[in-house]
Amino acid sequence: MLFKQLSLSLAPGEFVAIMGESGAGKSTLLNLVAGLDTADAGSIRFEGTDLKNLDDDARTLLRRDRMGFVFQAFHVLPHLTLAQNVALPLVLQKLAPQLALLRALARLEEVGLSSRGDDYPRELSGGELQRVAIARAVVHQPRAVVHQPQLVLADEPTGNLDPETANRILKLLKRQQEQSGASVILVTHSSAAAATADRVLLLTAEGLVLR
């Protein structure tokens, strides 16, 4: 994917929605911001750090400690229960497993899956898996203790959801932004979802333009 003259600055606590035609490179852009892909030119800076100066391990730690990512493909682990999937970022941060599970169950309740914590991903629909992925991306404790993402990257998080559930998810993202000061980049085809953002940008061949 070739981006020309692409420039984006995100203020702390800002919620930005990115729209564009299929194939425009929206998901690729999120992967670059997260350090999953590496740009051939230019720079991507997170809190002053240029990601190209970090090795794979350092980028992995940055994503684990400072970012939350909602993938289109969910990326839930099939051998873990839903609660264990959501608790995983906290466990990796050395939070006691029981405390991590309690926090995970609270997040599952917020996305309407309070009774499904002991279920496995194979038992869920695509829309339900999307909600699990969202709960995992924003699960947090107070910053001084453990994982609290300062950047949430959401790739079509409402694409498989009914309107009522989609609205609940968008409110959860907004609450994450407001309560923790996290910045959010939302990639979406939905004008209704984009309308919840502070700023809506359109990804075109000329770069990102205000919509």
Image: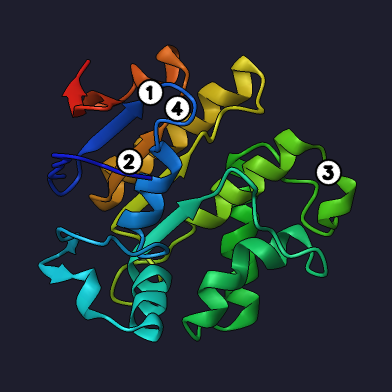
- What colour scheme was applied to this rendering of the protein? rainbow
On the image, numbered disc 3 is attached to which residue? 124
Q: Cα distance, mark 3 to mark 2?
A: 26 Å
The first of marks 4 and 1 along the sequence is 1
4 vs 180, nearest the viewer: 4
Disc 1 marks which residue?
20
Name which quarter of the figure residue 173 lies in: top left
C-alpha gap between disc 4 and disc 1:
8 Å
Q: CA distance from mark 2 to mark 1?
A: 14 Å
Task: Give the total number of marks visible in the rendering.
Answer: 4
Q: CA distance from mark 3 to mark 4?
A: 23 Å
Question: Residue tagged by mark 2?
Answer: 185
User: How crowded is the residue under tag 1: few (<14 C-alpha within 10 Å), some, or many (20+)?
Assistant: some
Q: For the residue marked with disc 2, what is the amino acid?
A: Ile
Q: Which mark is residue 183?
A: none
Classify the position of the N terminus by image quarter: top left
- Residue labelled with disc 4: 188
131 shown above or below 98: above
